[in-house]
Image: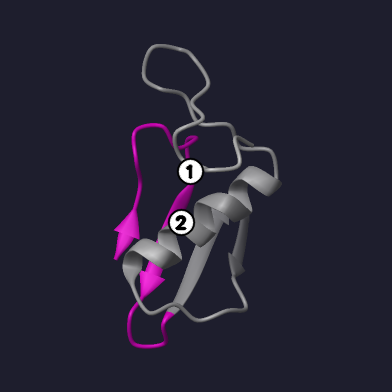
Amino acid sequence: MSQTRSEYETGMNVVYEPQSRRVVVNFRGRVQVLPDSYDSEYEAVTAGELHCRDLGWRPHDGKGHQSQLHSPWGR
């Protein structure tokens, strides 16, 4: 399943492949398969979004403000 949320940057997406239990992240022109396997799409998408945060993505809340809702660590 592919996730392209409204707060994602243009071209950014997170794809969970249930057959392999892997997540594929497309972020700023780079495609990466994360090394871990995930039991659910929720876990995979959360890991993919955290990976993008580590690379500099900062989601917005739809009102132009940066959101802290996607991470319990407030990154």
Which numbered tag is attached to residue 46? 2
Q: Please state the horizontal and vertical placement of residue 72, each as a whole percent of the image.
A: 53, 43
Q: Is residue 32 left or right of residue 72?
A: right
Q: Which residue is mark 1?
A: 11
The residue depicted at 41 percent of the width and 87 percent of the height is: 20
Q: Please state the horizontal and vertical placement of residue 65, each as a whole percent of the image.
A: 49, 14
Q: Secondary structure at mark 2?
A: helix
Residue 21, above or below 32? below
For residue 30, say whether it is visible.
yes
Foreground mark, 2 or 1, reads 2
Q: Which residue is farthest bottom?
A: 19
Residue 31, above or below 6? below
Q: Is residue 52 left or right of residue 20?
A: right
**Residues under labels 2 and 1: Cα distance?**
18 Å
Q: Please state the horizontal and vertical placement of residue 1, each as a whole percent of the image.
A: 29, 66
Which numbered tag is attached to residue 61? none
Magenta span covers which residues?
Answer: 1-21
The residue depicted at 69 percent of the width and 38 percent of the height is: 56
Q: Secondary structure at mark 1?
A: loop
Callout 1 crowding tier (Cα within 10 Å): few <14, some 14–19, many ≥20: few
Tag 2–tag 1 contact (CB < 8 Å): no
The residue depicted at 60 percent of the width and 48 percent of the height is: 52
Task: Report the predominant secondary structure element of the magenta stretch.
Answer: loop
For residue 27, say whether it is visible.
no
Q: Which residue is farthest left?
A: 1
How is the protein colored in the picture?
Answer: one colour
Based on the displayed image, in which of its 4 quarters is residue 74 positioned? top right
Q: Please state the horizontal and vertical placement of residue 35, each as a whole percent of the image.
A: 62, 78
Label located before the other in sequence (2 or 1): 1
Residue type at the position of mark 2: Thr
